[in-house]
Image: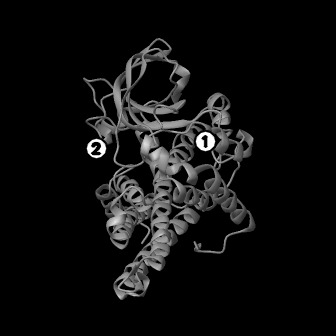
């Protein structure tokens, strides 16, 4: 049974129960097939939208549920236990494009994009990374050139989650000039839709894990973007992206904990059923120690995530907390799923058992929205900053 750092409110338990029930009926029975076929189930968007799960953090005035971050984390973990691919779709949508439009968008942009996104009528995506700009995101090359009231964009984005289904994509592009580069201050954010002339979807990645989440390249070829699609101020896009990733990393932490919790539950059940030398393997100290360490790491990760979520809602500086939560939870997911395969033995290595999929899904949590190495750099820098938390 999962637990929270502080007792959940009645509303939080209700939302958790709704997420758990939805996962049990609409996700879990199909997860293995979606993984095998590497398909995204489009009906999930409308179903989750009808429940309000695509507008969890959006105010009611923009058709959202106006929930707190902890409630969102609790619900997201329940979805991730069933399928991490569905969870990452939820996480990206709720943490990045919707929050960026909410915080920096104009009222016209909020009416046009944010409201239907909150209702689940439009799915959001986020395009920052490029083939040559991953951890060093500020070195991106996609160029935006002003043409009258419009902008002309050229470039390629990589590793775009929900890229084939995203209908509102926040894309970063350089608005400085090749002769006068301004580094991170030369990057702006744009609201991109697939109907724009020059927009193209490129290669769909054949991934090890999260196979039901489509990850693609996006190509912008003389793509004409109306001037009212600029998000916020010229030159502030990279700052917006980095601040929003603080939110996104909490979502990835919840996803990671969901993966780890699922692996733990499968392991506990299997250890009680599997017999060797005439005894259930749960009676062997080697297995008991593994299970104990797995449970401890999952609980510690959840405690840090919940603490971080509460701190965010109090308006505290979040960069260090979000990096810590993402780092611990993602490395916990990888470690716990590795131990789960060991407990399952040879059966853990075949696709007939779910821990094999959980192991594959866990790995990317140490990579996307900032690698573990980048998280450690962020944490260390924060320790010496004027805004340090300790």
Question: Left or right: where does residue 128 sit relative to residue 13?
Answer: left
Instruction: Note whether 17 is above or below 3 in the view shown.
Output: above
Q: Secondary structure at mark 1?
A: helix
Q: Quadrant of the N terminus?
A: bottom right
Q: Between residue 223 and residue 319, name the one nearer to us.
A: 223
Instruction: Note whether 308 is above or below 45 in the view shown.
Output: below
Residue 173 x %, y %: 38, 29
The mark that comes first in sequence, 2 or 1, is: 1
Which label was assigned to residue 136?
Answer: 2
Q: Between residue 237 and residue 254, name the one nearer to us.
A: 254
Which label was assigned to residue 320?
Answer: none
Count up the numbered dots: 2
Residue 277 x %, y %: 35, 85
Does residue 116 appear in this view? yes
Q: Nearer the viewer, mark 2 or mark 1?
A: 1
* Res 161 quadrant in image: top left
**Residue at 38% across, 49% down:** 209
Residue 292 x %, y %: 43, 81
Residue 354 x %, y %: 44, 59
Instruction: Note whether 113 is above or below 84 in the view shown.
Output: above
Instruction: Note whether 151 is above or below 375 in the view shown.
Output: above
Q: Which residue is mark 1?
A: 44
Q: Between residue 27 and residue 33, name the one nearer to us.
A: 33
């Amino acid at each position: 049974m999962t637990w929270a750092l502080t007792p959940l409110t009645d509303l939080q338990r209700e939302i958790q129960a709704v997420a758990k029930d939805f996962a049990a009926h609409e996700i879990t029975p199909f997860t293995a097939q979606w993984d095998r076929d590497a398909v995204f189930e489009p009906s999930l968007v409308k179903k989750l939208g009808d429940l309000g799960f695509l507008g969890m953090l959006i105010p009611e005035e923009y058709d959202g549920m106006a929930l707190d971050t902890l409630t969102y984390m609790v619900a997201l973990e329940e979805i991730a236990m069933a399928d991490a691919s569905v969870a990452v779709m939820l996480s990206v949508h709720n943490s990045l494009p919707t929050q960026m439009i909410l915080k920096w968008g104009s009222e016209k942009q909020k009416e046009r994009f944010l409201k239907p996104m909150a209702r689940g009528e439009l799915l959001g995506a986020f395009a920052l990374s490029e083939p040559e700009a991953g951890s060093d995101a500020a070195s991106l090359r996609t160029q935006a050139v002003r043409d009258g009231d419009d902008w002309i964009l050229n470039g390629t984005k990589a590793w775009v989650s929900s890229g084939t289904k995203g209908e509102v994509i926040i894309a970063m592009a350089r608005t400085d000039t090749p002769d006068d580069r301004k580094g991170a201050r030369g990057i702006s954010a744009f609201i991109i839709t697939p109907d724009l002339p020059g927009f193209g979807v490129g290669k769909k990645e054949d991934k090890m894990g999260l196979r039901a989440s489509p990850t693609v390249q996006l190509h912008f070829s003389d793509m004409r973007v109306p001037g009212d699609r600029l998000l916020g101020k010229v030159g502030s896009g990279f700052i917006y992206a980095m601040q929003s990733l603080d939110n996104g990393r909490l979502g990835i932490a919840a996803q990671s904990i969901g993966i780890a919790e699922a692996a733990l539950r499968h392991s506990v059940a299997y250890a009680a059923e599997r017999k060797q030398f005439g005894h259930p393997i749960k009676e062997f100290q080697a297995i008991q120690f593994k299970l104990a360490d797995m449970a401890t790491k999952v609980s510690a990760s959840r405690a840090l995530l919940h603490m971080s979520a509460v701190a965010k809602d109090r308006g505290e500086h979040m960069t260090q907390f979000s990096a810590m939560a993402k780092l611990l939870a993602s490395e916990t997911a990888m470690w716990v799923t590795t131990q789960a395969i060991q407990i399952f033995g040879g059966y853990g290595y075949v696709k007939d058992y779910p821990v094999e999929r959980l192991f594959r899904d866990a790995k990317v949590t140490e990579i996307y929205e900032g690698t573990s190495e980048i998280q450690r750099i962020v944490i260390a820098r924060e320790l010496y900053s004027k805004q340090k938390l300790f």
